[in-house]
């Protein structure tokens, strides 16, 4: 199994920046994709950004040009760099990892990002 631990969420003003981190442990060699979802109050969880072992990335249209997903293989950590934050980016951000032949999905506990003045 894969365990995930997010960090970095906090209150930030509109136009500000944050970097979220997601550290993976456990069966990390079986991971074939990692990324971030977010869920705002009263809304469904939505994909924000994803990173495959093959190196490809995908972003939600609402964050393209503002968010960047990256990884540090030596630290088994995936990052989400968020710039030009908007109030509508306010949500709980969840890290996920798909592992094994059946792409079993593991989730982190979530980290709160609040964009407000």
Image (cartoon, helix red, strand yellow):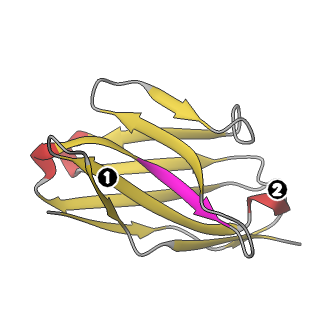
Q: Earlier in the sequence, mark 2 or mark 1?
A: 2
User: Which stretch is magenta?
Assistant: 35-39
Report the side of 36 relative to 46 (left or right). Answer: left
Compare residues 18 and 88 and report the one nearer the observer.
88
- Crowding at mark 2 (Cα within 10 Å: few <14, some 14-19, many 20+): some
The x and y percentages for residue 21 are 42, 58
Residue 4, given in percent of the width and then of the height, sits at: 30, 65
Instruction: Return the mark for residue 86.
Output: 2
The label nearer to you, 2 versus 1, is 1
User: Label 1: which residue?
Assistant: 97
Badge 2 vs badge 1, beta-carbon distance below 8 Å: no
Between the residue at mark 2 and the residue at mark 1, the CA separation in whole angstroms equals: 26 Å
User: Considering depth in this image, is 77 or 16 the residue closer to the camera?
Assistant: 77
Residue 36 in the magenta stretch? The answer is yes
Does 43 sit left or right of 59 as displayed? right
Please report the residue visible at 82 percent of the width from the left and 56 percent of the height from the top: 86
- Determine which of the numbered discs, if any, sits on residue 77 in the image: none
Is 56 drawn above or below residue 33 in the view shown?
above
Look at the image and tell me in which quarter the N terminus lies: bottom left
Residue drawn at point x = 31 percent, y = 52 percent: 97
- Identify the residue at horizontal 66%, vertical 63% (top origin): 44
Farthest residue toward the front? 102
Residue 16 in magenta stretch: no
> Residue 2, how many percent across, how many down?
19, 61
């Amino acid at each position: 199994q894969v365990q995930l631990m997010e960090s970095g969420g906090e209150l930030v003003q509109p136009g500000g920046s944050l970097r979220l981190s997601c550290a993976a442990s456990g069966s990390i060699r079986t991971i074939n994709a990692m990324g971030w979802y977010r869920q705002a109050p009263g809304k469904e969880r939505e994909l924000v950004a994803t990173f495959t072992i093959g190196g490809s990335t995908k972003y939600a249209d609402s964050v393209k040009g503002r968010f960047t997903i990256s990884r540090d293989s030596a630290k088994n950590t995936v990052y989400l760099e968020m710039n030009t934050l908007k109030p509508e980016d306010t949500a709980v951000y969840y890290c996920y990892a798909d592992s094994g032949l059946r792409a079993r999905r593991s989730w982190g506990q979530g980290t709160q990002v609040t964009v407000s003045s």
